Amino acid sequence: MLLFYDPIYTDGIDPTARFPRERYRLLYERLREDPDIEIRRPRAATREEITRAHCPEYVEQFIHGTLSPEAVRRIGLRPWTPAIVERTLSLTGGSLQALEHVLQNGGIAGNMAGGTHHAYYDYGSGYCIFNDIAICALTALQHPKIHRILVLDLDVHQGDGTAAICAAQKNIFTCSIHAESNFPFRKQQSDLDVHLADDTSDEDYLAALDRTLKKLEPENYDLLLYQAGVDPLKEDALGKLALTRKGLQQRNQRIFDLHRKYNLPTVLFMGGGYANPIEPTVDAFEDLFIGAAQTIKKSTNPAA
């Protein structure tokens, strides 16, 4: 399986920021020797690509470092370093290259970052600067074989920015399954929202997911964009659900089964994960990408 990663995913965030920047480096160290995973460094996303989903003025202000203090505060990741711009462009480029790969080859590809679903058209929020999911969705619609896209967001937080940016796009269906009481406190309206109570366990979560997948009619889509945040973990410092590591593995397997059953090109976005200490988060992300790689292996070699 093809994954995109750059050391700047960690190094582009100040060491004193509250965000757990080491999760990217730690995950890379676990996956880099896996024979079923190929890791490449991403290119930088272009202004043209980013402005498919974002206000040009906002994009220029971010790149040139002229956002207002209020706008920077709303995003978080403070204190910012000059490398935040390179990091953001590389992160977005990694998601776009994963998209390019599955549009050309099918299968699954992913970014060891991204899933920045709280970024809106003209401002960022909740650690998210540009919305790589929305950028990928709007980019994919330019492909002649892509007519309907399913955005499946299973982060513990609602994909509010994605829902807002894609609201007018009839060919993009946004679905978010999240903790109702968690951030963002002003929810947007996805095409389908599933609001879960605090402390939802594996059994109840997976039952809700199964009901949701039946409603989605996945056979009607040409592309799946999967925001696979692991912050539904019980150990997560910013989540309010109570999933176990095994529960997340079962969640992901349902999506991989969907991919195989309908031969649905799939892009994986890493999404949230904030356990403290960070090891349960890294464990869960390792499971995600190894599970995806095993799915590809089984698809190409059923005897494997």
Image: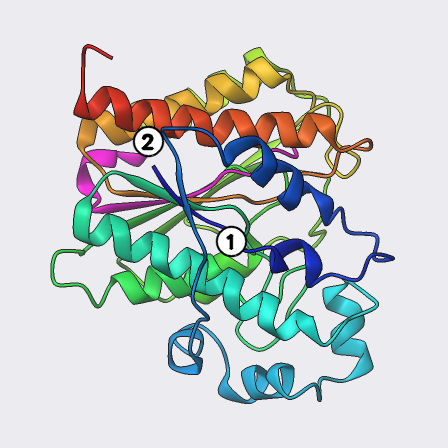
User: Would you say 68 lies left or right of 104 here?
Assistant: right
Compared across the picture, whether 160 is left or right of 299 comes to right
Identify the residue under disc 2: 215
Q: Quadrant of residue 100?
A: bottom left
Q: Amino acid at mark 1?
A: Gln
| x 44%, y 74%: residue | 50
- Which numbered tag is attached to residue 189? 1
Quadrant location of the N terminus?
A: top left
Secondary structure under the numbered disc 2 in the rendered image: helix
Q: Position of residue 51 (x, y in %)?
A: 43, 79
For label 1, the SS is loop
Q: Quadrant of residue 124?
A: bottom right
- Residue 260: percent from the left, percent from the top? 23, 26
Give the residue drawn at x 18%, y 46%.
105
Identify the amino acid type marked 2: Lys
Residue 301: say if magenta: no
Say which residue appears at 25% left-offset and 48% top-offset. Answer: 102
Quadrant location of the C terminus in the rendered image: top left
The extreme left residue here reads 144
Residue 25 position, x and y percent, is 65, 44
Closer to the chain start, of discs 2 and 1, is: 1
Q: Is residue 164 left or right of residue 226?
A: right
Q: Could you say which is closer to the camera, residue 145 or residue 281?
A: 281
Q: CA distance from mark 2 to mark 1?
A: 17 Å
How would you rate the neighbour count of disc 1 (Cα within 10 Å): few for under 14, some for 14-19, many for 20 or more? Answer: some
**Quadrant position of residue 257:** top left
Q: Is residue 126 visible?
A: no
Frontmost residue, 176 versus 273 = 273
Does the rendering let one see residue 26? yes
Which portion, as a residue range, is magenta?
215-231
Does the magenta segment cover residue 218?
yes
- Image coordinates for residue 259, horizontal then vertical, percent: 27, 31
